Amino acid sequence: MADDITTTLAHKHGISVDAVVALKDALQRGGGRQAQFSHRDLGGMGQWSAGGMTQVGDMFNNALRDKVNALCTELARGVANEPTPAPKQQTPDSNHWWPGDLGRASATGAQNGMRYACFPDTHRVAIKQEGRVTVYDSGDHRISGVSQQQSGTQDLSFSSQNGTVRAADMPVVG
């Protein structure tokens, strides 16, 4: 249901009220720190995290990605002041498949049997492939996007303020 703030944000960002509601719902599910959403006005499936990562289904539409980032950032401020809904029951290995000392992931994803999670606070990236978890040092990279090579190697590359960095080029720490 749309309220005055939702309608105001929709007009401010030039997006439908329904899309703003979808993002707000996703942010509530993510505790105000992350959102996974799917809405046609937002480029289809996408995700956002307060750690600085925004992905939209229309991958090369930087204007849409920036719009979603700005909108989520504004919405997250309001969601942080609302009661958090009870978390959904997780199935074993559906979440937190990474070592516990990495902290809270700012973004996670999976495709073709490979999973990844980004941890900006500890400067780490975890990748699970074929049942094995490898942890990489992301150094000073603030990761803002992920792409996966669909060849036989399934290489992951990450976008950061310093450009693209391949997981294979980051030091392994665990």
Image (tube, rainbow, N blue to C red):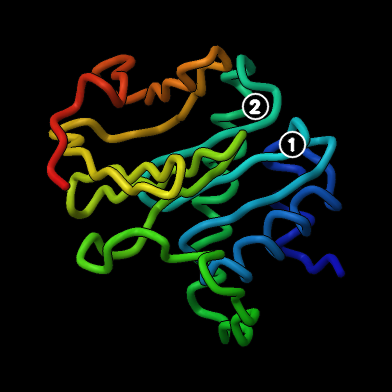
Q: Which residue is located at x 72 percent, y 39 percent?
A: 45
Please give the residue where the numbered disc 1 appears in the rendered image: 42
Give residue 97's position: percent from left, percent from top: 41, 61
Vertical placement of 127 versus 104: above or below?
above
Q: Quadrant of residue 4?
A: bottom right
Which amino acid type is shown beneath numbered disc 1? Leu
Secondary structure under tag 2 reads: helix
Q: Nearer the viewer, residue 32 or 143?
A: 143
Q: With 9 as the anchor, is 97 left or right in this view?
A: left
Q: Which of 126 and 15 is in front in this view?
A: 126
Vertical placement of 108 versus 90: above or below?
above
Vertical placement of 60 versus 27: above or below?
above
Q: Residues within 10 Å of mark 2 (few under 14, many from 20)?
A: some
Contact (Cβ within 8 Å) of mark 1 with mark 2? yes
Give residue 158's position: percent from left, percent from top: 37, 25
Q: Which residue is located at x 57 percent, y 39 percent?
A: 113
User: Which of the two labelled residues, at mark 1 and mark 2, occupies the earlier sequence position?
Assistant: 1
Please give the residue where the numbered disc 2 appears in the rendered image: 64
Which label belongs to residue 97? none
Vertical placement of 75 versus 40: above or below?
below
Which amino acid type is shown beneath numbered disc 2? Leu
Secondary structure under tag 1 reads: helix
